[in-house]
Amino acid sequence: MVKLVGIAGSIGEESYNRMLLQYISKHFKDTVEVELLDINDVPQFNEDEDDGNSEIIQALNRKISGSDGVILATPEHNHTVPAAMKNVIEWLSNKVHPFDGKPVWIVGASYYTQGSSRAQLHLKQILESPGVNAIVMPGNEFLLSNAKSAFDENGDLKDQRTVGFLSMVLKKFLKFMKVIDMMDAPDPKNAHEEDMKSTNKVNTTVEGVDMDDPEWVEKAADKTHAASGGDYVKLDRGLLTVDQLNWFLNSMAGELTYADDNNQFIYYNKNADAAHMLAPRTPDQVGDPLEDVHPARVVEHVKQVIYALRTGQSDVVSMPAQQGPNQHVMHYYRAMRDENRRYRGVNELVIDIMPILKYYLAATGQKLVKDPDATPISPITGLDAVTGASAHSDPTADATSGASAAAAPEEEKPAAPEVDATSGASEETEEVAPTPAPTPEPETDATTGASEG
Amino acid sequence: MKKFVALVGTNTAKSTNRKLLKYMQGRYADEAEIEVVELKGLPIFKKTTEMFVPEQAKTIAEQINAADGVIIGTPEYDHSIPALLSSALAWLSYGIHPLMDKPVMIVGTSYGTLGASRAQAQLRQILDSPELKATVMPSSEFLLGHSLQAFDESGELKSEEEVAKLDGLFQDFLLFTDLSSQLDHSKELHQEEAAEKFSWDNGLTEDNK
């Protein structure tokens, strides 16, 4: 569910703006989760004293950074925003900048007819200043005037027309957040423009830590106050501790790698040393831009894979790597997309499919035979749209992938077992043992190949 | 001789607005007694049922009451005045009204080129609000950009052009102070409204009616 935080602009009094936020939080709880942040104890801003590390500011920073959007409810004091709200914004625009790129919806309640109209204008101006750089929803002002009589004893808005209007504006804000979210997405115009140096920061990028730092994971975790160990993480669908997540991912029947939409290598399921991995990675590489974990000669190929996934031309790109009588390693690159269908990175699975094939043959009592009529497909799938390569093109001439150079010539590839899966053994078929392919160097890891050596 | 209170709109030790106000204090010592008053230490404004006003704010109010006019030096934080100055103005209009009909001159400095122009515009709007109703000198912006480079070691303003501009404005302000003391037809009404019909929330100033 969409997560918002709400801040009421004044402190130390019975606040109709807080009541308004509480009402929004309660009334729309099936649509959005709204957490109210308390600013009562935020000290007076002083740039001389701001090292960016105070507990209370860090807590606000984390909550706002982690939200999908912010609702600010402001009264009007002296034709402007209350000092208390401005004060919080000053803290949050100096050493830390959680509002940067964040969608903000301004509402306001007032005792009389003006409904904080001037304060809302000032607040917009403040939020759009470069240090804050929030993205304020235009139009759709919600000014609740005569606030004293607007709520009933349960804190509910009495006027149904007001509730209807509020609900309509909230819906617009939810849509606005989607649009803003897409604005943040890298948008290369062709594969060559894929930014392999990871300079197009996205809203999940951890700032202030050198991507090439060997201790990027530790430092970035520190910066974000990351959950760890026994901390619970709510997932779709389940609830696990970080330890449980690690056990789960590290026992997957394959090597998993996460490169985000800024082409930054941010995770792999470390269940073996590099020497024992099909596509070796080392712990110090995590955090690196993809360019730094690939040899220069494959970078353009990697770009094509990512571009095909990012743009939705393919959902999966697959290609073979090491091949032999007892091994047929495949790399599967899957596009990850969020609830707005925005590309959020590539999920790479490296897995040896030979044991699966052998199990299948053994369990069904079958063997592989060569199909004389077969028209072999390109060993690489999912890149046709990008490269124009067709199933009949010579994969070795296919410039799309670093993997193809190492892929076995067509006739040496194991033919697809044309067998009836339900009938069991088909004794007539002539056995063709998977032909030993020239063993390729593990240089075939086109997309994420964190380590080539 | 005229007496002015000069409010430093920020609490930072390295404020160039403080420098500017101190410079004015020295330069115009023959024409006016300028008292530079810090806002640092004022708590963030908040309303209470008993309408508590901190001692520091009361002291500043007395200083302003005893002065012929007020000079406010403001930097620009996030395209507006610092929360500290905003708090101060809120305290100075919370049951007490030292700024009401008081002549005010606004100056501002900034590290960049704009010289706090947006903050000054906002400050004018704020000072014009019904609870403050200060008499701000019109058409009188003094925006000092690149303020880190603007002063020499002894705190003198380096640019002759800026000095001439400031001199002119200050002479105008001296005159404006005299002039505005003659604008007394609405003053009684303002004070009356302020006393009887205050305020933002339980108030019935004409703005809210």
Image (tube, helix red, strand yellow):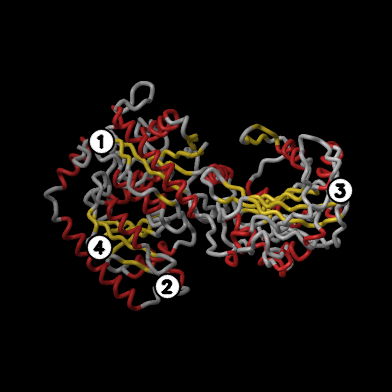
Residue A416: % across, % down: 77, 49
User: Which is closer to the viewer, label 4 or label 1?
Assistant: 1
User: Which is closer to the viewer, label 2 or label 4?
Assistant: 2
Work out which quarter of the rendered image holds the C terminus of chain B and state it. Answer: top left
Residue depicted at 41% across the width and 43% down the height: A173
The type of residue carrying mark 2 is Ala
What's the chain of the residue with tag 4? B
**Gap between marks 1 and 2 measured at Cα:** 46 Å
Q: Mark 4 or mark 2, which is nearer the start of the sequence?
A: 4
The type of residue carrying mark 1 is Tyr
User: Which is closer to the viewer, label 1 or label 2?
Assistant: 1
Q: Nearer the viewer, residue B88 or B120?
A: B120
Above or below, A58 relative to A290: above
The type of residue carrying mark 3 is Glu
Residue depicted at 64% across the width and 45% down the height: A225
**Gap between marks 3 and 1 measured at Cα:** 90 Å
The answer to whether marks 4 and 1 mark residues whose Cβ atoms lie closer than 8 Å is: no
Above or below, B94 relative to A398: above
Which residue position holds label 4? Answer: B1
The type of residue carrying mark 4 is Met
Residue B25: % across, % down: 35, 65
The answer to whether marks 2 and 4 mark residues whose Cβ atoms lie closer than 8 Å is: no
For residue A75, side relative to residue A406 (left or right): left
Which residue position holds label 2? Answer: B150
**Gap between marks 2 and 4 measured at Cα:** 29 Å
Which residue position holds label 3? Answer: A430
The answer to whether marks 1 and 2 mark residues whose Cβ atoms lie closer than 8 Å is: no
Residue A372: % across, % down: 79, 55
SS for dot 1: loop
- Labels 2, 3: one chain: no
Which residue position holds label 1? Answer: A112
